[in-house]
Image: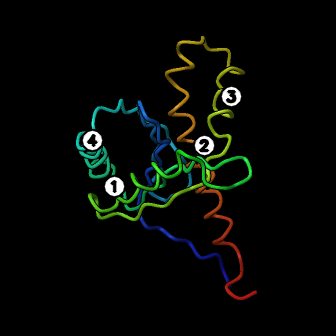
Amino acid sequence: MGARLRVEGRILAIDFGMKRFGLAVSDALGLTAQGLPTLERTNLNRDLSALETLIREYEVQEIILGNPLSKDGSASPMSGRVDEFAQKLGKRTGRAVKLWDERLTSAEAQRMLHASGIGLSKRQRAVDRVAATLILQSYLDWRAHCSRLPESV
């Protein structure tokens, strides 16, 4: 049996924060992640409206929302807020919203940006976008791996 290729449209990833959202979108085939400008949060209605605009613009079919689990994999205090936001976003947009383990993505984003040699102020502005890109790429890689597994094991 050949690999099952799922072409379902673009995927939007959100690195959830209280002050801003890091954003990334997949290519149309769902193979690569590209960072988008960070969304500064204002209030829930405006945040959802801005995300709806992006979803229409990029023809997003699925949304991945970074879930900040604790180091041991259990729900963190922020996980409840993320889950609540995911439900509101899904209801508002009519799109599937999946929570995706984002443990250590912000730390990895900081490490990557530091290693790149860019200044601290640029690093701080870019970290949310890079974290969202890492979240999305890990999800895309997982999907690609799962599509190569035999249908019956």
Are the residues flagged by discs 2 and 1 in contact, CB closer than 8 Å?
Answer: no
- The first of marks 4 and 1 along the sequence is 4
Residue projecting furthest to the front? 77
Foreground tag (4 vs 1): 1
Marked residue nearer the N-terminal end (2 or 1): 1
Which numbered mark, 2 or 1, is in the foreground of this view? 1
- Point out the tag, 1 or 3, that comes first from the N-terminus: 1
The extreme bottom residue here reads 152
What residue is disc 4 on?
Answer: 50
Distance in Å between CA atoms under marks 2 and 3: 11 Å
Please report the residue visible at 72 percent of the width from the left and 21 percent of the height from the top. Answer: 115
Residue that label 2 marks: 134
Above or below 15: residue 86: below
User: Which residue is denoted by mark 1 in the rendering?
Assistant: 89
Q: CA distance from mark 4 to mark 1?
A: 11 Å
- Residue 104 image position (x, y, % from top left): 68, 40
Q: Is residue 14 left or right of residue 144?
A: left
**Mark 4 or 3, closer to the camera:** 4
- Residue at x 59%, y 56% (from the top left corner): 139
Mark-to-mark CA distance, 1 and 3: 30 Å
Badge number at residue 1: none
Are dots 4 and 2 in contact, CB under 8 Å? Answer: no
Name the residue tied to disc 3.
Answer: 112
* Image quarter (top left, top right, bottom left or bottom right) of the N terminus: bottom right
Q: Residues within 10 Å of mark 1 (few under 14, many from 20)?
A: many
Image coordinates for residue 50, horizontal then vertical, percent? 27, 41
Q: Earlier in the sequence, mark 4 or mark 3?
A: 4
Closer to us: mark 1 or mark 3? 1
Is the C-beta separation of discs 2 and 3 under 8 Å? no
Secondary structure of the residue carrying tag 3 is: helix
Please give the count of numbered marks on the rendered protein: 4
**Mark 2: secondary structure:** helix
